[in-house]
Image (spheres, rainbow, N blue to C red):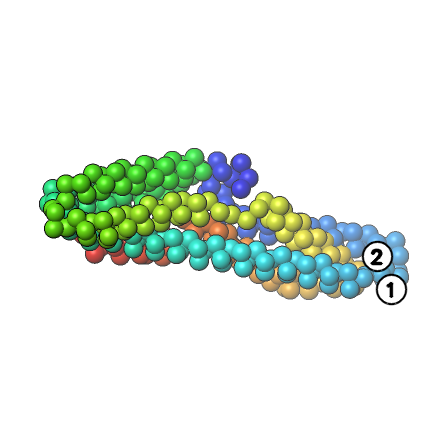
Amino acid sequence: MHPFLESNLELIQYAPAFFAVSILLFMGLGWVLGRYQGKKQSANSVIVRDPLAAAIYAMSALVLSFTFSNASNHYDIRIEAVRAEANAIKEVYLSTSYLQAADQRSIKKSLLDLLDLRLAAYKDNKTMHEFNLGAEKISTLVRQIDEDVAKASLSAPSSSKYLVERILAIKMGNLVTAFNNAAIKFKTHPPKLLIHFLYLLLCTGGVLTGYTMAVKNGSNWFLAVVYLLIMGIGLQVILSLENPTLLMPYEEFNKDLLLLKESLS
C-alpha cells in the first residue's frame, strides 16, 4: 500500500473514482490525438490497428480478472480467519468449566474483553498505525489469556487435570494460532506493481478508445460512459474485497463475532 494511503485510509474509498477520472482524461487525450491526426490526413488514410488495440484490451481484462480473483481469495481467507477467531473464543470459553470457579470467572471475563477488543480494533481506522496498534493490543491480550490459562491449569481440580491437558490446553493453543494467523492475513494485499500495471493498462485503453472514436468519426459516448461505470464498479468491488474492514458493511464482515457476542451475553 502506498505510504500516503497508509496515513489516510479513508481515501481508499475514492480510488475507483480516481481511476474512472483518469481513464476519462486519457480518453479525452486520445480523442484530441485522433482529431489532430484526422486533420493532418484524410480519414481513410489514418490507420487504426484493431488487433493491437484488441490485444491491449485483452491484457487489461486479464489483469483485471486476475486482480479480482486475487481479491476474492483474500476475502475468503479473511472471512475464514474471522470465523476461526469466533470459534476459538467460544471453545475456550466453554472449556473453562474444568477450572476452579474463580479462574473460570476471570478467564471468561478476559475472553469477553478479547471479543470486544477484536470488534473495536479494526473499526473506523484512519491510518495503518491505528490498525497495527489495534492488532498489537489484541496480540498482547491473547498472550495474557494464554498465561492465565496456563496458571489456572496448575490449580485445577484433580478430577479435571486430564481434561484440562487434553481439551482446554489444545483449545487455548488453537485460539493463539487463530489470532496470530488472522493478524498476518489481514495485512496481506496485492503488490503495488500489479495495481500500477492495471492503472497503466486502463489508461492506455482509454487513449485507444478516444483515438479510435475520433479517427473513425464515432461519437458513441454512451458506450464510453458505460465502460467507465463498469470499470469504476469493478474496481470498487476489488477494493472492497481487499479492504473489508474499511469498505465492507461492518455487520456483514464481523457477523460471526457479533453472533458470538450476542450468544455469550
| 170, 146: nearer the viewer | 170
Please tell me which residue is depicted at 27% across the width and 51% down the height of the picture. 171
Count of numbered tags: 2
Q: Name the spot of residue 211 as percent of width and height, x first.
A: 76, 56
- Residue 51 located left or right of residue 58: right
Depth check: 262 or 18 in front?
262
Secondary element at tag 1: helix
According to the picture, the residue beneath numbered tag 1 turns out to be 44
Percent across and percent down for residue 240 are 47, 53
Residue 227's x, y, as percent?
62, 61
What is the spatial separation of the Cα atoms under label 1 and label 2, in whole angstroms?
A: 9 Å
Q: Residue at x 40, y 47 (%)?
A: 181
- Which residue shows up at 22% across the image and 42% down it? 149
Say whether residue 261 is left or right of residue 45: left
Three-letter amino acid code at disc 2? Gly
Q: Circle 2 is placed at which residue position?
A: 38
For image coordinates 73% across by 61% down, the residue present is 55
The local crowd at label 2, few if under 14, some if 14 to 19, many if 20 or more residues have their Cα within 10 Å, is some
Q: Earlier in the sequence, mark 1 or mark 2?
A: 2
Dot 2: what SS? helix
- The residue closer to the viewer here, 63 or 80, is 80
**Residue type highlighted by circle 1:** Asn
Q: x%, y% of residue 144? A: 27, 37
Classed neighbour count for the residue bearing mark 1: other residues with Cα under 10 Å, few (<14), some (14–19), many (≥20): few
